[in-house]
Amino acid sequence: MSEKIKKASRHVNQNEGLIFEKSSPGKRAFELPPLDVPAAEASKALGSHYRKEGVEGFPEVSEIEVLRHFTRLSSWNHAIDLGMYPLGSCTMKYNPRVNEFVARLEGIATEHPYQPQELSQGCLKILRLLEKCLLEITGMDAITLQPAAGAQGELTGLLLIRAYLQKQGNPRKKVLIPDSAHGTNPATAVIAGYEVENIKSESHGQVDVEGLRRLVTEDVAALMITNPSTLGIFEQRLPEIAEILHAKGALLYMDGANMNALAGITRPGDLGVDVMHLNLHKTFSTPHGGGGPGAGPVAMKKILEPFRPVPILVEKENGRLALEPVRPDSIGRVKAFSSNFGVLVRALAYILAYGPGVRQATEDAVLNANYIRKHLEGVYDLPYSLPSMHEVVFSDAIQKKNGVNTMDIAKRLIDYGFHPYTTAFPLIVPGALMIEPTESESREECDLFIDAMKSIAEEAATQPEIVKTAPHTTRVRRLDEVGAARKPVLRWKPAAPRSTAAD
Amino acid sequence: MRYLPKSPVERQEMLAAIGKNSIDELFSSIPEKYRLREALKIPGPYSEAEVIQYFKERATENAAGYTSFLGAGVYNHLRSVVTDAIIQRGEFLTSYTPYQAEISQGTLQAIFEFQTLMCQLTGQDVANASMYDGSTATTEAVLMAERLTGRRRVLVARSVHPEYRDVLKTYAKNSGLRIEEIPFTKNGTVDAKALQSTLTDDVAAVVAQSPNFFGVIETYAPLAETAHAAGAMFVVAIAEGVSLGLLRPPAEADVVAMEAQSFGLPPSYGGPFAGVIAAREKYVRQMPGRLAGQTTDSEGRRGFVLTLATREQHIRREKATSNICTNQALCALAATVHLTLLGKQGLREMAEQNSSKAQFALEELLKVPGVRRTFDAPFFNEFTVELPRSVKIVNSHLLREKIVGPLALGTPYPELTKHGLVCVTETTPRTEIERFAGAVKRALEQPV
Amino acid sequence: MAYPKSFRYTKEHEWVDMKGDLATIGITDHAQHELGDVVFVELPKPGAKIETGKSFGTVESVKAVSEIYAPASGEVIEVNSELQNKPETINSDPHGAAWLIKVRLTNAAAISDLMDSATYEAYIAEKGKETSA
């Protein structure tokens, strides 16, 4: 390992097989308290439904083996708790531990969604306060906390738009989506029953407003826009875009994935957005947990309020809160039970910790991104030069000349002690390097990142092989994804028993 | 602010390094009139102690101290403290989706183990890395059937969880799917005759749940045969996964949509939980959600990667099998840890205790004059009873004794007014079951 | 790799080899090179009808999916089942063993409107210049 890499060095870490490979009949990791009622004769009671034996192949291991197994596995991951995760549009910020603590409180983690509402006022107050805070942050009139993730929020938003237009007589046919959009946008539009029409970005990476003017007809239900765009650039003509759409009776949907550039500074509602989703697992610090859970609340203008998913949180005369299960114009439910409540608790804890000071988090996020941009401009190609907000997108055009691409650079960054940035997205930048530091990175961490990226650029120029074959220091080298896709092996299977004849 | 690792001096130096005089200049691309000049009107800032205080106060305004007999899709089961000790490790809690496999092998191997456990439980060939919950998993299973058969009608048993059916209807409205409901018989199972009579060759899927919303266990084989004979797929939804410790899995199903909440996830007022889709191998390319696959690295070591990603939105965009991106990974990890702790014996024993306690509770309730069993059918840990008076009124009396009583069924099932759904798990002590039956008796003795 | 002179080529990088009114269709070397290692191929069944300009299947690599467009209309007579087990043949022998489908065309004459090998090679050379600009 090179001495020039300051942030990380090698360390012995443990190997570990699959839990099934450690299994041996008779081992147990958990015991139940003894049964205090007469044991039912299950085979009699259940008849043909009775399963004669335990689940075949289920592991049988001890408690210490389980703990070591997962502890060893955990040691193979990178995580925010270890260091910077500059993934663009993911907003990998610090996940405050007090959030985990309060979500686990007796009386918070233990509540059943069907218990009487008079015994759930604590939960309902949490929901109500979160609603109020998110409405204040977004500048919108109404909100639903039901969607379980951003993509589900997008679907909810489009269904709201559809229901609203339907009520006026025509749900319309198309949704316009910029070519820089995240893949969930077009996937969602199709599920909502719309055709997707792509709108090209103009030379600065912004939505082409003149192009939009031509495309918006009475067949268009909405434009789905991300702001700042996936290039990290603020859509300066957003109010004008809203007007163009509204003039033709269409609505403006905003993908709120990049709210970390806006919270406390400006409000989408003020800019003309009709409906938007938030990613609580991005802007509002709830943990990514290896891929989820998240939550995707949808905030909207008054015109869409009647169509909100049920149940609706209402305040009764005596100050009591209630969830009303029926509303005539509602689009229905998008998820069973009220929401990913545990995620909402964490988001509220985050908001309360900051209060109005959430603005400072936004400022620091934008400062960090610009600091990194300033130091890497010229080292990496910058395809779009408008001011960056909370993230910056470079390309591998310079390094490509030596045969080094964005994926190679990303893999080499691992050797320097960082998780890679987002590669190959947005699609409008070939060979993209999408970098979002978030406000959680100190100056020291930003400087280490800049040094690492400069060093890799130099390696790309002078010894490209070391970059092209990276990473060199991980437990596994580059994995055969082609083989994994051609002949998928998606589960463990026990080895076939040896035939006794052979013995 | 304690979450921000910068001092005022450092901010100044960084601004200077980028040639700006103030933070404000960094926001110059936002038109002046849209920039907020006043502070947001939200409470805070709260110190850590104040954050905790806020939530502790909310916790006292809920149902702590009550014994609950609610199930209906969300179940109280024992959870080992070891599960939290593991999922709270920063390397699991604060890591990202394992797109960069070389530094995410921990997450990927755990997903692979989860997929394996789900296959073992359900008797299917492949399982994905999770959906949002049982309701959306059921919906996605139906959408799979639509894609695979090219057909547009879906027959859903009325005994499937009402909220699962609601979610399916919301999604179906916009994809041109026609959802029709199949009634249940007087013993609570799917009306096979009604199913047969309406099954024509335009049906994509037949959907049933077992144990169903009433706790009644369905027999899969005849339903599967009927569906398959008409070229339709058979989708089974499972809301109470612990039942698979004691019940035959739905091996006849083409797709299983299961809720994994029972495996180590607290009720948490309805979420986050974890849905699972498990199916036959031949359907794998139509499955939504992430899949972890086994492979080797360039030096021959075993490793794991996300695979078959061309099904997903980030590559396939408008032609993706689903729009799902973020899933319920950490919840699926909790389920994986929980199930490996329980192991083969533990899950079996837990299931047996559920069955025994529920049988005992039913016997105790049937001793109360006027209480009758709704459905004469095998059940796991939930059953329905008919009371001689309104369930809501009985429950109001039970609340005074700090008991949360049966779920009244009259709203989702108007023909079952005066019927209530009772759930008993291994966590309910015998003394509480006896007290419950006594409280029901006392409630029924109250003057009207 | 050479582009067989007897084939005709489309702008979407399919090749067509005519024998009477029976057309054998595949994707070109250029297409497989752009895609990378092929992991999966989705093709119609014998008896299916394909329509000029419409997609009749897909070719997948790990990171991308490409639609395959019908160069002309007709009925699918035979499908190359080898590709289910060995999709990598598309990378190693795109113009030969990795033929995708054989189709009885409704209008065989339409094929002569497609590019010949020289025109196609010029076309991809031109495209190459555009992307590196």
Image: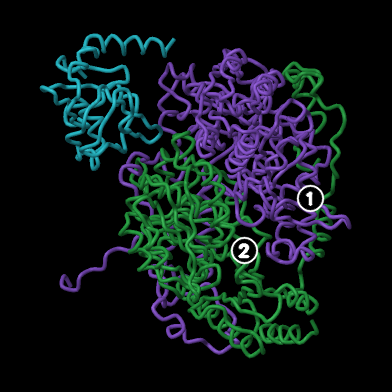
Position of A207 with respect to C3 (left or right) is right
Of the 4 image quadrants, the one containing the C terminus of chain C is top left
Residue A390 shows up from this direction: yes
Question: Whole-percent x and y of residue B182?
Answer: 47, 62
Q: Which chain is rendered purple in the image?
A: A
Image hue for chain B: green
How many residues crowd around disc 1 within 10 Å: few (fewer than 14), some, or many (20 or more)? some
Disc 1: which residue: A128
Question: Whole-percent x and y of residue A249?
Answer: 66, 25
Check the image and report above or below for A148 versus B363.
above
Question: Whole-percent x and y of residue A413?
Answer: 52, 32
Question: Tags 2 and 1 in contact by the CB under 8 Å rule?
Answer: no
Residue at horizontal 47 percent and vertical 58 percent from the top: B156
Q: How many marks?
A: 2
Disc 2: which residue: B412
Cα distance in 3D space between marks 2 and 1: 26 Å
Q: From the viewer's side, name the closer residue of A473 and B417.
A: B417
Q: Which chain is rendered cyan in the image?
A: C
Q: From the viewer's side, name the closer residue of B341 and B250.
A: B250
Of the 4 image quadrants, the one containing the N terminus of chain C is top left
Name the amino acid type tagged 2: Pro
Check the image and report above or below for A126 versus B263.
above
Position of A444 with respect to A359 (left or right) is left
Q: Chain of mark 1?
A: A
Q: From the viewer's side, name the closer residue of A33 and A73.
A: A33
Residue B304 shows up from this direction: no
Position of B415 with respect to B318 (left or right) is right
Check the image and report above or below for B368 versus B277.
below
Name the amino acid type tagged 1: Arg
Instruction: Tell me the mark number nearer the camera, choosing from 2 and 1.
Output: 2
